[in-house]
Image: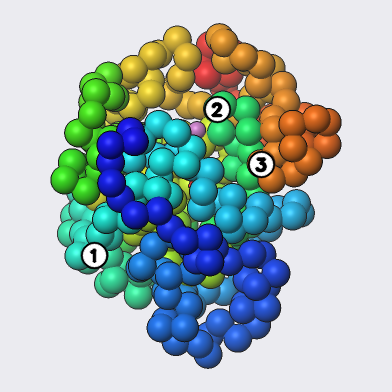
Amino acid sequence: MARWSYPRPLSSEITPRSAWLSRRRFVAAVTSATVGGLAGHAQADALRTRPGPFQAKETPTSLADVTHYNNFYEFGMDKSDPSTYSAAFRPRPWTVTVDGLVSRPRVWDIDDLMAAMPIEERLYRMRCVEAWSMVIPWDGFPLATLLRQAEPLGNARYVAFESVLRPEQMPGQRTGLDSLQWPYVEGLRLDEAMHPLTLLAVGLYGQTLPTQNGAPIRLVVPWKYGFKGIKSIVRIRLVEKMPPTTWNRMNAAEYGFFANVNPDVDHPRWSQASERIIGAGGFFGGGRKKTLMFNGYGEQVAGLYDNMNLRTSY
Ligand SMILES: Nc1nc2c(c(=O)[nH]1)N[C@H]1C(S)=C(S)[C@@H](COP(=O)(O)O)O[C@H]1N2
Ligand SMILES: [Mo]
């Protein structure tokens, strides 16, 4: 990976949480020129958001960790690769196609989409399948709002998502990660997709999404392992059959379609009973906690799985 020669972001571009908190008080008044380039890369602009429901109680992970400890294999396999190698990625112009089993298919320009949707800020816990976690203030809108506009047909049962395929800007798509079969794809059952917790994020910490976090638009499903949160989405398709998903296709024994956070069902190679909290307390003690069923969102989502055996449907 070292042969890629993208510029590294300067540490001066990284804003600590304290600066974010004070900035939030006047964020509506500042121009994008003032806040441009805060986290990650050039496209960051202030977003107009309003506080949404579902606020986690935990302290948010620092903006530096949220933007420098990432999984985004299109930009490499190490946690630092996405922030390093995504600088040349251009999330404009961009369209998101909503089609398949709907009455009103549409190709949305991303800016029209962001203007049409009410953007809320929601502090969500995120749990990666690799047994670490963060708490991230996402800015986005419910996926349900977009799907309702498309008017799903009666035979639509699942939603299939597709990431952008752009090897000229995504070095990981040019290397030997063949088994992933680009583009990255993901899916949800329609009732999961319509759940009010399921978010399409267009920003975090009050600014447009940094490239390494999935600019310009990505999925966030907080009761599922992080790999369900597909980044840089170009297509959302309503379908009848359960769609293929990237990690399940690569290794079905290790990564299921549902991928609900579940401390009682271990990954074949490690325990899911606890998680390392990124940015808290280092490796010795302090920075771990017990993992909660559905990542702590059981009250909201357990009913979706009443008739399912979550040991076999993992
Ligand atoms: N297109 C795409 N989306 C992706 C991934 C990826 O490699 N490619 N990685 C997933 C995984 S494994 C995780 S944990 C989250 C990480 O999101 P973050 O870097 O914003 O924390 O993105 C998910 N979405
Ligand atoms: Mo992950």
Quadrant location of residue 183? top left
- Cβ of mark 3 under 8 A from ligand 1: no
Q: What is the count of numbered marks?
A: 3
Three-letter residue code for mark 3: Ile
Q: Dot 1 lies on which element? A: loop
What residue is disc 3 on?
A: 278
Whether residue 119 can be seen here: no
Three-letter residue code for mark 1: Arg
Left or right of residue 262: residue 114: left
- Cβ of mark 1 under 8 A from ligand 1: no
Mark 1, Cα crowd under 10 Å, few <14 / some 14-19 / many 20+, is few
- Cβ of mark 2 under 8 A from ligand 2: yes
Three-letter residue code for mark 2: Val
What residue is disc 1 on?
A: 92
- Tell me, yes or no, whether the two marked residues, 1 and 3, touch with CB atoms within 8 Å: no
Alpha-carbon distance for marks 1 and 2? 30 Å
x and y percentages locating residue 273 in the rendered image: 72, 21
Residue at left 83%, top 31%? 285
Residue at left 59%, top 42%? 126
Alpha-carbon distance for marks 1 and 3? 31 Å
Q: Dot 2 lies on which element? A: loop
Residue at left 45%, top 33%? 78
Counting residues from the start of the chain, the first of labels 1 and 3 encountered is 1
**Eyeballing the image, is 77 above or below 164?**
above
What residue is disc 2 on?
A: 129
Residue at left 62%, top 28%? 131
Q: Nearer the viewer, mark 1 or mark 3?
A: 3
Nearer the observer, 303 or 48 = 48
Mark 3, Cα crowd under 10 Å, few <14 / some 14-19 / many 20+, is some
